[in-house]
Amino acid sequence: MNYLKSLLIVLLTAMGTNQVFAHALWIETDVNGKLNAKHEVKIFYGEYVANERDSVQKWYSDVRDFTLWLTTPKNEKIKLETKAGANYYGANFTPTQEGVYLLTVVHEAKELGGTTKYEFSSVAPVAVGKNAVISGSAIANPLHAIATEAKVYKVNSAVKVNAYLNGTAAQGKTVTVFSPEGWSKDFTVSADGTIEFLPLWPGRYVLEASNYEEKSGQHNGKAYTAAWQGATSSFVVSK
């Protein structure tokens, strides 16, 4: 009986760990903003490829306690207030200058998944005016993958993505592209820290970079033996 009980606990723990790996946090917002006009932002948690956006009450651990930051074109960092909806957290800001704004989240979950520590992060650009170039190396998130321009892309036109880990090119790491049609594909980051692909359908695409390391330490009084990072961004494609 004790053996069967222990086996069940192990299986349930593994299932829980796999579920965490399948989920991600991502930001959705219009990529183009207007001067002195309120700009809306939504933050979701779930599985984008399955079109699943979890109720905020079901978000893993304390992920709902994330902090949303806005970095202005002049590099000012502002904490934005968020408000819970049914399956998202909403926020807004009003651009007062031209340039590229960056919305960022980095949150280390309080609870471990088995003996793995989890970090969820996301970044979203908003371009106001003509400048749409995104400097990937200027984003503070430890891990991120983001399109090189803050714009609406076109079907069958190349999308180039920069991927960074701890301030340097994330060579050899995996970036998964999730399409609005339920299609996904893994790409390996090149030596210059990029991937490139052709979007085949219109709609919103989500990028997720991941990093897994076997390392030990203490997190909120509990021992961990591995650390996982999942970082997202998204962009829109039109016909």
Image (cartoon, rainbow, N blue to C red):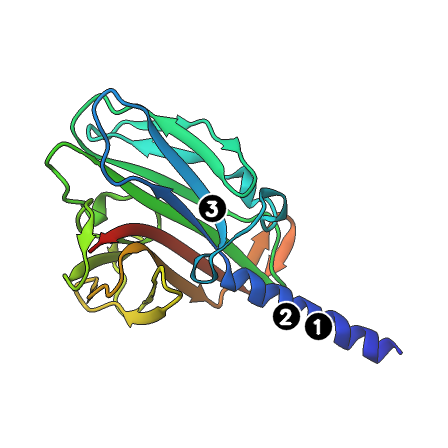
* Residue 143 percent coordinates (x, y): 34, 54
Give, as a three-letter code, the residue at label 3. Phe
Q: Earlier in the sequence, mark 1 or mark 3?
A: 1
Q: Earlier in the sequence, mark 2 or mark 3?
A: 2
Image point (22%, 49%), residue name: 136
Is disc 2 surrounded by few (<14), some (14 to 19) or many (20+) residues within 10 Å? Answer: some
* Residue 230 percent coordinates (x, y): 42, 57
- Quarter containing the C terminus: bottom left
Query: Looking at this view, is 133 or 29 the one in front?
Result: 29
Residue highlighted by disc 1: 10
Task: Name the mark nearer the viewer: 1 or 3.
Answer: 3
Residue highlighted by disc 3: 44
Circle on res. 139: none
Give the image quarter of residue 196.
bottom left
Residue extending furthest toward the right: 1
- Quarter containing the N terminus: bottom right
Give, as a three-letter code, the residue at label 1. Val
Is 39 located above or below residue 210 in the figure? Answer: above
Disc 1/disc 2 C-alpha distance (Å): 6 Å
Is 53 located above or below residue 210 in the figure? Answer: above
Residue highlighted by disc 2: 14
Please say if the residues under marks 1 and 3 sit with CB atoms less than 8 Å apart. Answer: no
Disc 1/disc 3 C-alpha distance (Å): 29 Å
Please say if the residues under marks 1 and 2 sit with CB atoms less than 8 Å apart. Answer: yes
Can residue 216 be seen here? The reply is no
**Image-based side of 57 in relation to 157, left or right:** right
Q: Secondary structure at mark 1?
A: helix
Disc 2/disc 3 C-alpha distance (Å): 24 Å
Query: Looking at this view, is 5 or 127 the one in front?
Result: 127
Image point (36%, 68%), residue name: 184
